[in-house]
Image: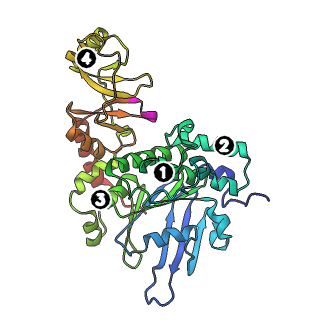
Amino acid sequence: MSEPTSTTSESTRAGGARILLEGVTKRYPGQERAAVDNVTLEIPAGEIVMLVGPSGCGKTTTMKMINRLIEPTSGRIFIGDDDVTDRNADQLRRHIGYVIQGAGLFPHMTVADNISLVPKLLKRDKSRISDRVDELLELVNLDPGQYRDRYPRELSGGQQQRIGVARALAADPPVLLMDEPFGAVDPITRQRLQDELLRLQEELHKTIVFVTHDFDEAVKLGDRIAILQVGSEIVQYDTPERILSHPADDFVRGFVGHGAALKQLTLTRVRDVELHDAAVAQVGGDEQAAIADARAIGREHVIVLDAQQRPQRWLSLRDLERPGSLRAVERDHDLETVSLASTLNDALDEMLTASHGVVVVTGRRNAYQGVVRVETIMDAMNELRAAADDAEPVV
């Protein structure tokens, strides 16, 4: 059996595809009001669009009609140039990634079997599937040798959610639908998963439709945000910058809530600001050389890195005066770090509990990149306020 034709060409599938909802309505029998009523919405290729609003506003129903887990009563839905309302629904879903809260992994299947589920349905070559599993595990920062043969019960909630994202990406779909995927994990894990999604998006440029109740999450992740109210009316569809600085009406102002100025920090990533250098030392390195390097740049502490350049802990110059202090350095699990994909709001949160006045920044595979200072955050906030005042509406 040949593989079903995708909604887009192979070249397009390497990135994202435009989604267009045109007059989409969903009516359930016996209900006077439509669950979704005549929604028209264009989602640009390669962008993350957040659907946010109170319970019952139709945001999840709207998203599920894109892959026809819920069949629209009327209207048309395009992915690329194809009207998918005429497609075979099962074939359509095999070319749309789908991530739900709690990952939804099959407990009797290994990690590798969970990830390879859709490629197997598409009759892809076994060796190609195996390579793809390892590639995706690497992509979500999980070691294939350590995780591919484990079962979901052996994983933490955050690890399961990473596997859920890897499974959704297995067939390289142009579109990824995410239904409150990080809602069931603790706040620290949630922040890390958000950062991981942003890092993945930098590499993959998928079109992502993401449903959330959390407006802060919408501001952090979204290129655009659609704010819905009951009756599936889209009250404002705009960039996070415009929604924070120019809310469309009182409903949006109430949804944004207090602290809009502070939320502006969520609009800037750590990678967008200048990082500063800290004094660094290597595990197994020379203590006296590390002390000399730190004093040369006026530092009283060094950040110790392992062989993979991953931050382990801060040590004072007094600590380094003890012979052998760098011989075996265990990781401080309370070390305050953020990633390049983190927002300045994340950095500020970490900084408030940091004891060194800075936050360590890591990149791919948690390698050290530099530090962020509070002065940098304050400068960025002033720039954001000025830019918001001059911003023009999205047409």
In the picture of the structure, the residue carrying the numbered disc 1 is 153
Judging depth in this view, the residue of 202 and 331 nearest the camera is 331
**Quadrant of the snapshot with the C terminus:** bottom left
In the picture of the structure, the residue carrying the numbered disc 2 is 130
Quarter of the rendering containing residue 338: top left
Q: Amino acid at mark 1?
A: Arg
Closer to the chain start, of discs 4 and 1, is: 1
- Model colouring: rainbow
Secondary element type, mark 4: loop
From which residue to which does the magenta span run? 364-368
Callout 1: 10 Å neighbours few (<14), some, many (20+)? few
Q: Is residue 89 above or below residue 12?
A: below
In the picture of the structure, the residue carrying the numbered disc 3 is 244
Callout 3: 10 Å neighbours few (<14), some, many (20+)? many
Asked if residue 367 lies in the magenta stretch, the reply is yes
Which mark is drawn over residue 297?
4
Closer to the chain start, of discs 2 and 3, is: 2
234 to the left or right of 255: right
Q: Amino acid at mark 4?
A: Ile
Identify the residue at horizontal 64%, vertical 70% (top origin).
Answer: 89
Q: Amino acid at mark 2?
A: Ser
Mark whose residue sits in front, 4 or 1: 1
Closer to the chain start, of discs 2 and 1, is: 2
Q: Disc 4 versus disc 2: distance between alpha carbons?
A: 49 Å
Q: Amino acid at mark 3?
A: Leu
Identify the residue at horizontal 29%, vertical 20% (top origin).
Answer: 279
Residue 32 position in % (x across, y down): 44, 90
Mark whose residue sits in front, 1 or 3: 1
